[in-house]
Amino acid sequence: MMIGIVIAHYVWLPVPILPVLVGMVFVTLLLYKQAHAQSVAILVCCLLLGMCVMQYHQQTSEHASTESRFDRSRSFFLEQREQLLQRYQDGGLDGDAYAVVAAMSLGDKTALTREVRSMYSVSGASHVLALSGLHLGIIYMLLSLLLPRRRWPAVSQLLSILVVWAFVLLVGMPVSAVRSAVMLTIYGILSIGHRNKMSVNVLAFTALVMLLWNPAWLFDVGFQMSFMAVWAILLFVPVFTGVFSDKYYMEHPWVAKGWGMVAVSMAAQLGVAPLIAYYFAQFSTCFLLTNFLVVPAAFLILCLSVVVLLFPSLAYLLLYIVQGLNAALDAIANLPGASIGNLHPTILQVVFIYVLIVCCYLLIERIKPIMGWTPWR
């Protein structure tokens, strides 16, 4: 489907795709006795579906002249966000501290200066400035602790999902937040039925839903980095955490938490590093150290942000935390060799890097049973 979106984005085909897609679906149904031919037909259907969706999106974008009900709702939520941002300023937040809190809690990056963006980018902490799975995961976790999940699991999941989507609308529906919200929605639905809640199939289904809604998101940098980070986490975190046995983790809970954070950081960086090099021409070498600082700090900042919105007089607590975080990241960014610059890979080289990453994963999974590998106890 993604290949079809790319083709339709760059090449306009005069032939209507929808009738061809319908005919191909009919051919696919007739090939039920020939498994291999049907598989090829399904791939062709997905290709045509991507082309059809992209052409429809391009046509509607060209003829869209009136504001839809969805746009009016989005404008309403953005107005509410402006009022909440004003409460931060009323509490005494200003300068870089206000800019960081506004970006991390409500997705407003307009106040971020070039120096702050560069500092977070060089130190490998720029992901906390973009609302993503980290932020929505913290919100979902807090809601799970507050709501009675054991007594009314379905109601609790429904309320959590509604609050998450309300927050996504409030922050302007950035692509990374929409991706996280869709995955959390699927996670909540599957958890009610006690199914496998997080897998590559869930991630692929999330991408399918988002691209059916807006196929142009495929060319968005945030979309690409968000999905590649989660894809790498789903694949490589079990590989990294499998170094130690479950018994060792139970006997050393602090090792489990620390190594778990290291595994997630390494996996996410592995997934987005080629894209960062392609789009931003640099790579942060201090991302592990940075994540040990920014992840707990992001949790505290999000929690205190809610408190400050209710009680603006407590903004000084948030001010101290953000100033301390910025000072620490500035020190990391000024370390020798904190970032490798002047990286300019081509799109073909980026594709080959991802092929190499997949091959390494398959090789590890293949040689583990052959070598008789067992976790360290």
Image: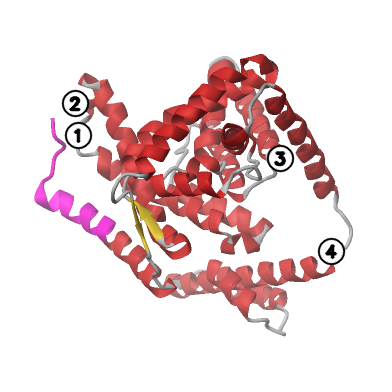
| Residue where numbered disc 1 is placed | 244
Q: Residue at x 49, y 31 (%)?
A: 298
Note whether 310 is above or below 42 in the view shown.
above
Q: Secondary structure at mark 2?
A: helix
Q: Secondary structure at mark 3?
A: helix
The x and y percentages for residue 367 are: 16, 54
Inspect the image, locate mark 4, and give the three-letter code of the amino acid beneath it: Ala
Q: Earlier in the sequence, mark 2 or mark 4?
A: 4
Specify the segment rendered in magenta: 360-377
Q: Mark 1 touching mark 2, by CB under 8 A?
A: yes
374 in magenta: yes
Decide: few, some or many residues near mark 1? Use Cα within 10 Å; few <14, some 14-19, many ≥20: some
- For the residues labelled 4 and 1, the Cα–Cα distance comes to 56 Å
- For the residues labelled 4 and 3, the Cα–Cα distance comes to 21 Å
Q: Mark 4 touching mark 1, by CB under 8 A?
A: no
Note whether 276 is above or below 335 in the view shown.
below
Q: Indicate which label's residue lies in the foreground, 1 or 3.
A: 3
Decide: few, some or many residues near mark 4? Use Cα within 10 Å; few <14, some 14-19, many ≥20: few
| Residue where numbered disc 4 is placed | 64
Inspect the image, locate mark 3, and give the three-letter code of the amino acid beneath it: Leu
> Which of the labelled discs sits on residue 69, or is there none?
none
| Residue where numbered disc 3 is placed | 169
Q: Indicate which label's residue lies in the foreground, 4 or 1.
A: 4
Q: Specify the quadrant of the image occupied by residue 28.
A: bottom right
